[in-house]
Amino acid sequence: MRRDGSRWVDPAPLEIARPRLPWWTLLPGWVKLIISPIVLTWLVIWILAKLVRLCWYYPLTITLLVGGLALDWWAGHYLVGAVASVVIVGLLVWWWRFTESFTRRCRWLRTEVRRMSVYAWEWRTVMRLANLTGTAKGREYRPRLKRVRSEGWRDKVAVRMIQGQAPEQWTERASGLAHSFHANSCRVRVTGPGRIELDLIRSDPLTGTLPLPAMADASGVDLKRIVIGRTETGKAWRIRLLGNQILVVGVQGAGKGSILWSVVWALAPLIKAGLVRLVGIDPKGGMELGQCPEVFHEVVYDNGPDAVELLEELANEVRARAGEYRGLRRRWSAESGQPFTVLIVDELADVIAYQTDKRLKERAQAAIQTITSQGRAPGFATLALVQDPRKEIVPFRNLFTTRIAMRLDEATQVDMTLGDGVRERGAEAHEISELTPGVAWVKEEGKREPVRARAFYPTDSDLADLRAYINGWTGEVLPFRSPSDGGEGGAAA
Ligand SMILES: Nc1ncnc2c1ncn2[C@@H]1O[C@H](COP(=O)(O)OP(=O)(O)OP(=O)(O)O)[C@@H](O)[C@H]1O
């Protein structure tokens, strides 16, 4: 605005923040004097709590530091330097020459180093950049880094979330967190109210092929937990057959066959003892089950009327056994004297979806639904393998209580196989490498967390051994007799 030739300019608003003094500085001097012992005590407790926390998270570092300082005070710098050099060189040589034992035994050392150098170091920045912090009344709230445990292939990082935060917010940012903490992937697990655990995966412990174990005794096989491989934590991969129906889904070459034969291998002692009966359907003309037909009580190599009749026969048995048990027993047990029956269907889709005869298809679907829905109590389990998990192919997926997703093409197939939300908890079966057939994600009914595992690898010679075992051949080879002994040649008993 111009007035009498002069130029009036509005003053700029004051942009600086008014300095605000803490409220307690405004208290009168005598009040400060009275409350000072309380404040001092609180301060000492706070410092002590911080020290205890430090010792809890870094016991080794604190011990070494205190030990080093004591030694320095007692014996001087040179001795401390010499001892430290010897320890460091010793550790380096151990790591270089015996990496495996170093990795196994020095977990505590690795945990502290990784906590200090990766997680504690970058925590604040990563939390802010990943938008996992919050602000209220001018104060920043940050998720708290709790215990870290480094297992070599993964780091388990416990976190206390801030108020109002949901684990889903972490799941959404899992990929970003993995990159920020230099890991290959990140899984989020809920461990309690307000608490989660991040699994930051740094390498795959399931890259090596697992040979089948030695054949167990019949007494050593438990139908509630047969061993068919190893989980990524190094434990035995056990699956339940008793009262369970299992669906295995995987693309061609995912290694479905290895799960199938690992199950049969584990059951072999019970099959031989007559306690377990296998019934098989292999619509691929016997390419899979035909490798060891001896283990089967009955097996059909197509998806025609024979296969459907076999399924209906089993469905009738299920109903009949259920009727027999009524009022006598609640569920199958070995004392019933009847064999536990396992139905194995190698390519389920061929039997219940790709069958061109509509009538046969419907009969097959009805029979399998009866076996899977009612077979639990009378001692019938199903192991069905399929490549395509869509509802149009397997309309009764929900009847399978254990679902196994091997390598799949798309994320949606993982959701179809394992159920909603399981992929978000880490079960990324569509990310399984082509180089690791036999690796799978397992979701059991009633268990929240999926498990990643790899099945044993049954070779052709293992299957030959299985045939021989079932046929009762001991495999003992007798020495060749020379013609001078009057013998004819080698023999096997
Ligand atoms: N557990 C395993 N460990 C190591 N290698 C395996 C394992 N399982 C399978 N393989 C390898 O992967 C190849 C494919 O396996 P397999 O034929 O069992 O897959 P599949 O899913 O049954 O395929 P398809 O649907 O075509 O029958 C095998 O030839 C074998 O070499």
Image: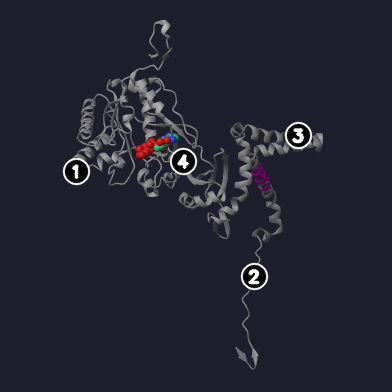
Q: Is mark 1 within 8 Å of ligand 1?
A: no
Secondary structure, mark 1, is helix
Judging depth in this view, the residue of 164 and 433 nearest the camera is: 433
Q: Is mark 4 within 8 Å of ligand 1?
A: no
Q: Name the residue tied to disc 1.
A: 358
Q: Is there CB contact under 8 Å for labels 3 and 2?
A: no
Residue 50 picture location, percent across and down:
65, 44
Range of residues picked out in magenta: 43-51
- Work out whether mark 3 precedes mark 2 in sequence or the reverse, and give the earlier one: 2
Give amino acid for label 1: Lys
Category of crowding for the residue at label 2, using alpha-carbon neighbours closer than 10 angstroms: few (below 14), some (14–19), many (at least 20): few
Ligand 1 falls in which quarter? top left
Q: CA distance from mark 3 to mark 2?
A: 56 Å
Q: Quadrant of residue 12?
A: bottom right
Residue 147 picture location, percent across and down:
57, 41
Q: Of discs 2 and 1, which sits in the foreground?
A: 1
Quadrant including the C terminus: top left
Residue 1 picture location, percent across and down:
60, 88
Outermost residue on the bottom side: it is: 4
